Amino acid sequence: SQQGEEDPQALSIQEGENATMNCSYKTSINNLQWYRQNSGRGLVHLILIRSNEREKHSGRLRVTLDTSKKSSSLLITASRAADTASYFCATESDNAGNMLTFGGGTRLMVKP
Amino acid sequence: NAGVTQTPKFQVLKTGQSMTLQCAQDMNHEYMSWYRQDPGMGLRLIHYSVGAGITDQGEVPNGYNVSRSTTEDFPLRLLSAAPSQTSVYFCASSYSSSGETQYFGPGTRLLVL
């Protein structure tokens, strides 16, 4: 079963626009992580946000976490064609023995 | 550092055959894990290890065995391959099992006929 569910499943935008992806989960968590996967490659870690944090930034990435709504969002500002990839959220919780549970991902396409 | 390496990159098996997917990391990470990724889906945890000599089952362990005799290596064995095991397999490692970035290998694409 998947703890995290991303929305939308697919997103197509023009270069320079912002992209927002959402993740919802079901149980309480210790932290939530976002990963990027380029086609045919492994996953690359983007940001980890802990359950007592509400927002984190890294370059053009902004992640928010609302534990009351059990949701997180990933915002990519001023998108570039190189941002084209699949983005996954993953949750870590005591319920799952601290294992990471991944959602199904959002496929982002940034058109030049 | 080479990071997390996986071999082979691609493998074709016939139903019933066995094989071992290799995973190695040179970052002295205690925690290692195996995931499978099916088309259009996220990753599902197969087995994981919190240190040498310790392994445990993840979400989808059936049909797979693991061992962890050294900190560096974490092989995944398919005992009797089935078409349902056609997937892309990723190995990952991190310093610990909690609150840490996981580093992923490039993946092994497995096709079972």
Image (spheres, coloured by chain):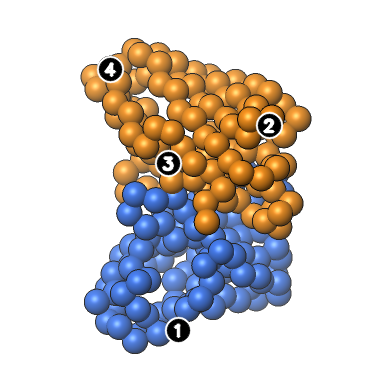
Look at mark 4 in the image and give the residue it sits on. A14
Please state which amino acid type lies under the numbered disc 1. Answer: Leu
Q: In the image, which is nearer the foreground, mark 1 or mark 3?
A: 3
Residue hosting label 3: A105
Q: Residue at x 37, y 71 (%)?
A: B85
Per the rendering, the colour in which chain A appears is orange
Q: Position of residue A89 (x, y in %)?
A: 52, 39
What colour is chain B? blue
Q: Can marks 3 and 2 be said to lie on one chain?
A: yes
- Mark closest to the chain's N terminus, 4 or 2: 4
- Pick the residue in front: B28 or B60: B60
Circle 1 Cα neighbour tier, 10 Å, few/some/many (<14 / 14–19 / ≥20): some
Residue in the image at 71% along x and 65% along y: B51
How far is the residue under mark 4 from the one under mark 1?
47 Å
- Could you tell me which secondary element the residue under label 4 belongs to? strand
**Could you say which disc has been placed on residue B79 in the image?**
1
Q: Are marks 3 and 4 in contact (CB under 8 Å)?
A: no
Residue of label 2: A67
The chain identifier of the residue carrying mark 1 reads: B
Q: Amino acid at mark 2?
A: Thr
Res B27 seen here: no
Amino acid bearing label 3: Gly
B33 on left or right of B54: left
Residue type beneath disc 4: Gln
